[in-house]
Amino acid sequence: MPEEIETLSSKKVYENRWMTVREDAIRRRNGKGGIYGVVEKRDFVVVIPLDGGVTTLVQQYRYPVGKRFWEFPQGSWEESEVAPEELARAELREETGLVARSLTQIGHLYVAYGYSNQAYRVFVVQGLHKETTDLDEEELGLISREFSTDAVQAMILDGDMMDATSVAAFGLAKLKGFLN
């Protein structure tokens, strides 16, 4: 069976330290040509801190949409490759000051595979204790706060939590039995 889509050529059209955008000339199985724009970004982690029926969310200003939103701690490192578990622990401590005794990976999802190769791993962390945060420059103004998991579910249903990654992570945790 022939390939679904054959890549004829590929060129970078934009690059910075966070992402690369490339344009691929392609040929479909039926012989027709086309172009794909692909955003390449490093994978990241999403961390759901759980302590009984309570979780911790972070809120920060999101420049592309010009608003602040609540979401689960998440992030990647642009400078180096690290194990997802190490990244999850680091992002949790950096953004919330929380340190977890146990960490469980519950999923691996893509952000938007229609135009990007970026994926993320979802972790549930438990056995939490508080230390200090270590925010980087892009996170200035970030705040963290505890919410009941019922309140987070209400925020999702009411449209108050709009980060699709956090909503997907919450749903996955619920389906896997980590949340009531």
Image (cartoon, grey):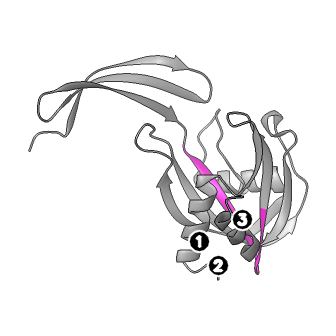
- Which numbered disc, 1 or 3, marks the residue that appears first in the sequence? 3
Q: Given the image, on which type of amino acid does mark 1 rest?
A: Ala
Question: Neighbour class for label 3 at 10 Å: few (<14), some, many (≥20)?
Answer: some
Q: Tell me residue 73's x, y (percent).
A: 72, 54
Q: Tell me residue 23's x, y (percent).
A: 38, 22
Question: In the rendered image, which residue does mark 3 sit on?
Answer: 155
Q: Which residues are magenta?
A: 43-56
- Residue 46 got which mark? none
Task: Tell which residue pokes out farthest to the right in this image.
Answer: 132
All told, the count of numbered labels is 3
Looking at the image, which residue is at 50% across and 42% down? 118
Q: Tell me residue 62's x, y (percent).
A: 73, 39
Q: Given the image, on which type of amino acid does mark 2 rest?
A: Leu
Question: Neighbour class for label 1 at 10 Å: few (<14), some, many (≥20)?
Answer: some
Question: In the rendered image, which residue does mark 1 sit on?
Answer: 173
Q: Given the image, on which type of amino acid does mark 3 rest?
A: Met
Q: Are marks 2 and 3 in contact (CB under 8 Å)?
A: no
Q: Is residue 55 magenta?
A: yes
Looking at the image, which residue is at 85% across and 69% down? 129
Q: Disc 1 and disc 3: Cα gap in Å?
A: 16 Å
Task: Give the quarter of the figure containing the N terminus.
Answer: top left
Question: Neighbour class for label 2 at 10 Å: few (<14), some, many (≥20)?
Answer: some
Q: Quadrant of residue 52?
A: bottom right
- Residue 179 got which mark? 2
| Kind of element beneath mark 3 | helix
Q: Tell me residue 172's x, y (percent).
A: 54, 68
- Residue 113 visible somewhere in the drawing: yes
- Residue 102 visible somewhere in the drawing: no
- Which numbered disc, 2 or 3, marks the residue that appears first in the sequence? 3
| Kind of element beneath mark 1 | helix
